Image (spheres, grey):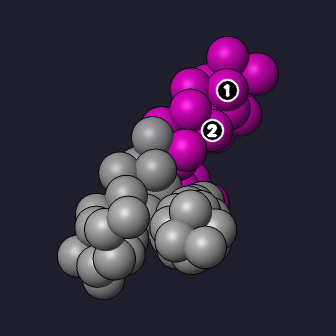
Amino acid sequence: MAKASKKQIIKAGLIGGAIFSLVVLLVDKLMGRDFSWLRLVFYFVFGVIMYGFLTYRNFKKHQK
């Protein structure tokens, strides 16, 4: 099994965070909420951290 590289984890976190924030933005638009940069940035940062952590945990789990 290949070792988890930081580059792969960061890349997966950024892609996952971007997709998550776009989905949340779409749901907010469908629900009629106003656009907020602060909320979008919060969801992006939250998504990057969570998807990065989940990717790291997944790589570690498959190494065993």
Disc 2: which residue: 24
Between the residue at mark 1 and the residue at mark 2, the CA separation in whole angstroms equals: 5 Å
Locate residue 13: give its quadrant.
bottom left
Given residues 16 and 28, the one toward you in this image is 16
Give the residue at x 38% y 64%: 1
Q: Which residues are magenta?
A: 20-40
Q: Which residue is mark 1?
A: 27
User: How many numbered discs, if any?
Assistant: 2
Please say if 13 is above or below 33. below
**Vertical placement of residue 9 versus 35, above or below:** below
On screen, residue 45 versus residue 50, left or right, reads left
**Helix, strand or loop at mark 1:** helix
Contact between marks 1 and 2 (CB within 8 A): the answer is yes
Q: Position of residue 41 (x, y in %)?
A: 49, 66
Residue 7 placed where, x, y %?
23, 76
- Horizontal and vertical percent for residue 56? 52, 73
Q: Amino acid at mark 1?
A: Val
Amino acid bearing label 2: Val
